[in-house]
Amino acid sequence: MEKKLSQKELAAKVGVSRQTIISLENNRYSPSLILAFEIAYILEKDINEVFQFIKSEE
């Protein structure tokens, strides 16, 4: 919202579908590290401000 980007615009900038962005927002998809960094870069945020990385229990 701060960057005034729509889901579609953000998706186009990082080369994924709008559905992928929706899935990320709803915590139904975990991005690759590269995708996470690309999104953070475009949003001009630290990756930790954009994503919460939680270690899975084995």
Image: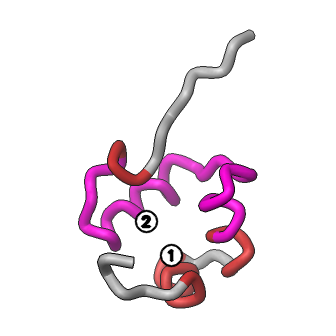
Q: Which residues are magenta?
A: 22-47
Mark 2: amino acid: Ile
Task: Please identify the quadrant where the N terminus is shown.
Answer: bottom left
Q: Is residue 9 left or right of residue 20?
A: left
The verdict on residue 25 being magenta is yes
Considering every residue shown, the one lying at the far top of the view is 58
Residue at position x 57%, y 21% in the image: 55
- The residue that disc 1 covers is 14
Q: Which mark is residue 27?
A: none
In the image, residue 28 lies at what x, y percent?
74, 51
Residue type, label 1: Val
Labels 2 and 1: the sequence-earlier one: 1
Give x and y (percent) for residue 54.
55, 28
Q: How is the image coloured?
A: secondary structure
Q: Which residue does the image show at 71% across and 62% down from the upper left?
A: 23
Q: Position of residue 21 (x, y in %)?
A: 62, 70
* Location of residue 37 by image quarter: bottom left
Q: Where is residue 33 drawn, in percent x and y?
A: 50, 47
Which secondary structure lies at badge 1?
Answer: helix
Q: Is 50 positioned to the left or the right of 41 in the image? A: right
Residue that numbered label 2 is attached to: 39
Q: Are the residues tagged 2 and 1 within 8 Å (C-beta)?
A: yes
Measured Cα–Cα span from mark 2 to mark 1: 7 Å
Q: Quadrant of the C terminus?
A: top right
Q: Categorize mark 2 by other alpha carbons within 10 Å: few (<14), some (14-19), many (20+).
A: many
Please rate how many residues cluster around mark 1, counting C-alpha atoms within 10 Å: few if below 14, some from 14 to 19, many from 20. some
Give the mark count. Answer: 2
Please determine whether, in this image, residue 46 is positioned above or below residue 17.
above
Residue located at (65% from left, 47% from top):
30
SS for callout 2: helix
Q: Which residue is drawn at the image coordinates 56% and 82% (left, top)? A: 7
